[in-house]
Image (cartoon, rainbow, N blue to C red):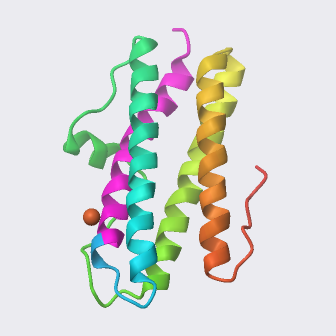
Amino acid sequence: MKYEKTKEILNQLVADLSQAVVVIHQAHWYMRGTSFMRLHPLMDDYMDQLNGDLDEISERLITLDGAPYSTMEEFIEHTGIKSEKGSYAKDINDHLAHVVEIFRYIADKYQEGIEASAEEGDDVTNDILIGAKTIVEKNIWMLQATQGKAPNIDPA
Ligand SMILES: [Fe+2]
């Protein structure tokens, strides 16, 4: 079947981006600390960004005759992103480190999709995923800089 591997990764991303929004929403709600006023709205920006990517990726999958996961149960069954119960005791830097971890995971999935779509000749998906990966890597740089760290982007 055409674009089979590409479609598989697009659906994986549907589950992962859905779960990423949930975990970042938790950081938005549960963070406490001196940088709250700056970081709380930043999580809103990330959610908007991820929801935008989620919609674009789902709709690309539909365009390729695919069927995106669309229930909480499917997202949980397929995502590789773990979550845990919210806690006010969690330090603001731990929230940031967790968000960076999620962005790194997503950047890797985008890379898998970039490679699969290049291999299968799906230039449009390739373009969508390259654009999405660029933004996620920039987020990683900025979050790492906030913590006094180098980006450490794996060139893959
Ligand atoms: Fe809010």
Q: Ligand 1 falls in which quarter? A: bottom left
Seen at 59% across and 29% down, the residue is: 128
On screen, residue 100 above or below 91? above
| Res 3 quadrant in image | top right
Seen at 79% across and 52% down, the residue is: 155
Q: Is residue 127 left or right of residue 2?
A: right
Q: Position of residue 117 (x, y in %)?
A: 64, 23
Q: Position of residue 73 (x, y in %)?
A: 20, 44
Q: Main secondary structure of the magenta part?
A: helix
Instruction: Say which of 125 and 115 sits in front.
Output: 125
Q: Is residue 48 left or right of residue 70?
A: right
Instruction: Say which of 29 and 41 sits in front.
Output: 41
- Magenta segment: does it hold 56? no
Instruction: Say which of 126 and 147 sits in front.
Output: 147
Seen at 34% across and 80% down, the residue is: 31
The answer to whether residue 121 is seen in the rendering is yes
Q: Is residue 99 left or right of residue 24?
A: right
The answer to whether residue 112 is seen in the rendering is no
Magenta highlight range: 1-28
Q: Is residue 77 left or right of residue 46?
A: left
| Res 144 quadrant in image | bottom right
On screen, residue 137 above or below 25? above
- Extreme residue toward the front, this view: 37
